């Protein structure tokens, strides 16, 4: 357990390992709280557009940074992880299969409405655009590289496989296969889904906030847009859950090496990191409730 923290500790020493451990905390624990806030935005938007309701104002006051929807999600993630790895595994399997089904729907239905004229030119000429009041490069090969770097977040799962290596039955055999399979699977689905998107709607017309829903609506498939929006709200919490799932393991590795309090390395009778998970869950839930994660 420990992923890059464990490597840094044994290869470089305690200080680089400490830095790596806190960077992993940003990647897993803090980003899971940020993901919960993003899900909350999607949820309220979905309730308004699909159900015609806004939900209780006190759950997400418009004049406050408080977001109880996000906090509720992180509290739920904490509760599942406290139940043990087997419970977490079942949740991940069910939601992941649902998410893959939604992506497969996007690919199949999107490619059925594919228009080759919409992907011409395949690499548009480089342009300078204004984003949040500042000039930025878009399109061209620099734009391709910027887009590739931004999409890296979608591949984070592959290094989490290493972080959870201690849970594997045969890590020497299964971990390398899991890493390669995760990267190839994520790349294949992402490329096909993106290709379907630009084939349905010209790249200049794509709405970054609601890309697939608007693309399906643009080809007269409002029912598909509603299905995708509902699927996104249903499966998006898995991002926060998977991020949080690894966090207690990082803390365990650091506490075992004496870089965090011993409480984070305590294992209960069932082999669960109950105390460390609870402490982390309270902190991450507070982040989700009170930190807006945007400027």
Image (cartoon, rainbow, N blue to C red):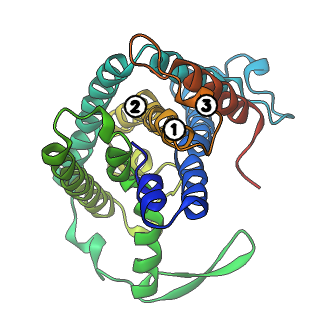
Which label's residue is closer to the chain start, 2 or 1? 2
Query: Which residue is tagged 2?
Result: 235
Image depth: mark 3 or mark 2 in front: 3
Front in this rendered view, residue 109 or 139:
139
Nearer the N terminus, badge 1 or badge 3?
1
Marks 3,2: beta carbons within 8 A: no
Label 3 vs 2, first from the N-terminus: 2
Q: Is residue 221 visible?
A: yes
User: Residue visible at 61% across and 52% down?
Assistant: 22
In the rendered structure, find residue 256 and report the number of the disc placed on it: 1
Q: Which residue is mark 3?
A: 262
Answer yes or no: do the residues labelled 1 and 3 have beta carbons within 8 Å? Answer: no
| Residue at (47, 14) in percent of width and height | 268
Counting every numbered tag in the picture gives 3
In terms of secondary structure, where does tag 2 sit? helix
Compared with 159, 138 (above or below) is: below
Q: Which secondary structure lies at badge 3?
A: helix
The residue at the point 79 percent across, 30 percent down is 66
In the picture, the disc for residue 50 is: none
x then y, percent, for residue 77? 51, 23
The image position of residue 36, as x and y in percent, is 58, 35
Question: How many other residues sit within 10 Å of disc 1, few (<14), some (14-19) or many (≥20)?
Answer: some
User: Is residue 35 placed above or below 114 in the rendered structure?
Assistant: above
How far apart marks 2 and 1 lie (CA) works out to 34 Å
Whole-angstrom CA distance, mark 3 to mark 2, is 35 Å
Count neighbours of disc 3 (C-alpha within 10 A) and say few if under 14, some if 14 to 19, many if 20 or more: some
The reply to whether residue 73 is visible in this rendering is: no
Quadrant of the drawing holding the N terminus: top left
């Amino acid at each position: 357990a420990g992923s890059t923290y464990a490597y840094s500790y044994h290869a470089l020493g305690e200080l680089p390992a400490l830095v790596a451990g806190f960077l992993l905390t940003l990647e897993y624990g803090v980003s899971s709280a940020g993901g919960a806030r993003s899900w909350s935005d999607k949820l309220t938007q979905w309730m308004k557009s699909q159900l015609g309701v806004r939900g209780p104002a006190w759950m997400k006051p418009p004049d406050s940074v408080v977001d109880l929807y996000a906090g509720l999600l992180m509290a739920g993630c904490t509760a599942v992880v406290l139940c043990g790895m087997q419970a977490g595994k079942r949740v991940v399997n069910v939601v992941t299969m649902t998410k893959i089904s939604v992506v497969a729907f996007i690919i199949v239905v999107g490619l059925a409405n594919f228009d080759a004229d919409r992907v011409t030119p395949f690499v548009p000429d480089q342009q300078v655009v204004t984003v949040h009041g500042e000039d930025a490069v878009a399109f061209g090969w620099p734009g391709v590289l910027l887009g590739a770097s931004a999409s890296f977040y979608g591949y984070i799962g592959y290094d989490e496989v290493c972080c959870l290596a201690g849970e594997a039955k045969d890590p020497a055999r299964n971990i390398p296969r899991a890493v390669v399979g995760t990267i190839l699977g994520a790349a294949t689905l992402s490329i096909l889904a993106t290709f379907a998107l630009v084939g349905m709607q010209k790249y200049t017309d794509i709405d970054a906030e609601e890309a697939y829903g608007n693309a399906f609506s643009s080809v007269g498939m409002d029912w598909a847009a509603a299905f995708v929006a509902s699927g996104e709200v249903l499966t998006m919490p898995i991002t926060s859950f998977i991020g949080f799932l690894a966090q207690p393991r990082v803390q365990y590795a650091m506490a075992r090496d004496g870089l965090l309090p011993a409480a984070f390395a305590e294992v209960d009778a069932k082999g669960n990191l109950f105390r460390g998970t609870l402490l982390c869950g309270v902190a991450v839930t507070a982040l989700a409730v009170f930190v807006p994660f945007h400027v």
